[in-house]
Image (tube, coloured by chain):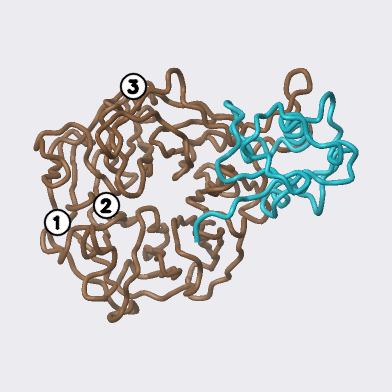
């Protein structure tokens, strides 16, 4: 299972506490994790990436194993620790504004 | 006894204020959607328990929320488990999917070049007068969307952007459809207003639109005195019994039209300044109107630090200052365009919210005022429901 940590407002929107655990079919990529997240919580569609272009929203960041994956292409494979669930995939609201 | 429910959208959540018909003791519920910008909440005239809300954030984008129990509980429309699986088991979750129809096109940018339309948020929600499942949404970048399934899905009425949309240009506050007025007598007629775009009208239910800005003068913003679009309309209001009579607070100037926007004339009269944002009409006196004069486009606060609502009982030109109960020194708040509303009790109640977080109410048509709450986040919108 893939572990995903959502920011506070998206946890509230999805109605979950703590981490989310997802089954990802196929290669564990950024897009694969987001597909699985949106399939499980359709209310999050459009809140992490654009409905149509599937581009990451500007103030959303992705982290895995302390590395910033925000600017990596969606098909980027995530590290083994994410695949085997020892580390969570982090979706974070970027620091922006005051 | 009748009740009133005041729906308040703020920069950091929504609040629902309720009172009985005397309107002297208020219950404050909230924050709902704490931490989110709540641009607008509005109840369905056909079913007051149905309330639509626009929730947005710079981080997470647009969410539409709906309550079917008068604001006690909320859900994004279409979020029941059985509604979330589309064809082939694919997830739906489309209540926040606002996609411009057809070729996106461009509008004028700040530097005069052309810039593609980009959806940012919903500023205003206008439920149908008859059908609780039909609702219109005014968007930034400026466009109008319609839902006929209670907000589950939306489609653009793209004819609006064909009304010279390539010439619209965002102002300092963005370029949004912030005003939607549904004609109470003619179901095919809708008015909208766009800052730095102008006023527009459809007579065929939203298929085609035309600018209705004749008579508006914006000499410092628009060098062309006869410019058909581009006027910075801040707000339009109409009385339900006389939908052809429109009152407008423009960037500068208070205007009126007696022919559904075909032509406008200035009624600023003796106002101390005619810059401002909201304008509204008394529920029982169609010629009684209210504005909140603001010092200038550079200084968005009341003149001389005195918060004054101005009332005209003659449809404009002759204005009187309403000051009783409002701060008359050191007040430097603003009142935004969607932050004034009226109830339909006797006497008519007038409400407005400030960027300082106060919501003021008058239960006597504006003669005197009291704060319902004083310390909310900056108020973006105020709507009122009069309940049996």
Do dots 2 and 3 share one subunit?
yes
Please identify the quarter of the rendering in which residue B380 is found. Answer: bottom left
x and y, in percent, of residue B341 in the image? 39, 57
Precedes in sequence: disc 1 or disc 2:
1
Task: Name the disc covering residue B268, or none.
Answer: 1
Instruction: Write the residue at 14% across / 44% down.
Output: B218
Precedes in sequence: disc 2 or disc 3:
3
Residue B288 horizontal side relative to residue A28, left or right: left
x and y, in percent, of residue B330 in the image? 30, 80
Mark 1 or 2: the one toward you: 1
Residue B228 in the image: above or below residue B220? above
Instruction: Work out which quarter of the rendered image holds the C terminus of chain B and state it.
Output: bottom right
Mark 2 or 3: the one toward you: 3
Circle 3 is placed at which residue position? B208
Instruction: Write the residue at 67% across / 29% down.
Output: A74
x and y, in percent, of residue B29 in the image? 61, 65
Query: In the image shown, does B225 or A9 lie closer to the viewer?
Result: A9
Q: Which chain is cyan?
A: A
Circle 2 is placed at which residue position? B286
x and y, in percent, of residue B18 in the image? 55, 65
Q: Counting other residues with Cα less than 10 Å from the Cα at mark 3, is it few (<14), some (14-19), or many (20 or more)? A: some
Tell me, yes or no, if residue A91 can be seen here.
yes
Query: In the image shown, does B194 or B291 lie closer to the viewer?
Result: B194
* Display colour for chain B: brown
């Amino acid at each position: 299972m893939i572990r995903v940590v959502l920011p506070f407002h998206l946890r509230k929107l999805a109605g979950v506490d703590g981490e989310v655990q997802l089954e990802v079919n196929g290669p564990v990529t950024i897009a694969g994790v987001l597909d699985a997240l949106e399939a499980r919580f359709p209310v999050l569609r459009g809140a992490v990436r654009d409905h149509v272009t599937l581009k990451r929203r500007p103030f959303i960041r992705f982290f895995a194993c302390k590395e910033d994956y925000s600017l990596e292409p969606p098909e980027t494979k995530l590290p083994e620790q994410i695949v085997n669930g020892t580390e969570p995939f982090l979706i974070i609201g970027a620091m922006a504004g005051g | 006894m009748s009740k009133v429910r005041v729906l308040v959208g703020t920069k950091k959540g929504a609040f629902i204020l309720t009172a009985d018909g005397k309107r002297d003791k208020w219950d404050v519920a909230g924050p709902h959607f704490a931490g989110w910008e709540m641009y607008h909440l509005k109840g369905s005239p056909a079913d007051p328990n149905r309330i639509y809300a626009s929730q947005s954030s710079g981080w997470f984008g647009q969410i539409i929320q709906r309550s079917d129990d008068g604001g006690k509980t909320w859900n994004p429309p279409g979020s029941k488990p059985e509604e979330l699986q589309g064809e082939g088991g694919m997830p739906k979750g489309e209540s926040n999917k606002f996609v411009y129809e057809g070729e996106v096109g461009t509008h004028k940018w700040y530097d005069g070049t052309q810039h593609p339309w980009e959806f940012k948020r919903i500023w205003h929600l206008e439920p149908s007068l008859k059908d609780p499942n039909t609702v219109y949404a005014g968007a930034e970048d400026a466009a109008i969307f319609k839902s006929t399934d209670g907000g589950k899905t939306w489609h653009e009425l793209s004819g609006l952007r064909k009304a010279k949309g390539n010439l619209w240009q965002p102002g300092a506050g963005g370029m949004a459809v912030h005003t939607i007025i549904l004609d109470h007598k003619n179901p095919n007629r809708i008015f909208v207003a766009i800052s730095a775009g102008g006023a527009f009208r459809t007579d065929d239910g939203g298929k085609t639109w035309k600018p209705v800005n004749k008579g508006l003068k914006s000499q410092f913003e628009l060098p062309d005195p006869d410019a058909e679009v581009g006027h910075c309309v801040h707000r339009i209001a109409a009385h339900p019994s006389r939908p052809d009579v429109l009152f407008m607070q423009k960037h500068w100037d208070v205007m009126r039209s007696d022919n559904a926007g075909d032509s406008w004339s200035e009624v600023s009269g003796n106002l101390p300044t005619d810059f401002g944002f909201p304008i509204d009409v008394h529920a029982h006196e169609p010629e009684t109107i209210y504005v909140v004069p603001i010092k200038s486009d550079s200084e968005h606060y009341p003149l001389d630090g005195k918060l004054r609502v101005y009332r005209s009982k003659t449809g404009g030109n002759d204005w009187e200052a309403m000051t009783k109960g409002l701060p008359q020194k050191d007040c430097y708040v603003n009142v935004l365009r969607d932050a004034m509303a009226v109830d339909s009790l006797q006497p008519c109640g007038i409400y407005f919210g400030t960027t300082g977080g106060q919501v003021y109410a008058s239960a006597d048509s504006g003669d005197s005022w009291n704060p319902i709450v004083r310390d909310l986040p900056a108020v973006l919108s105020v709507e009122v429901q009069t309940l049996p």
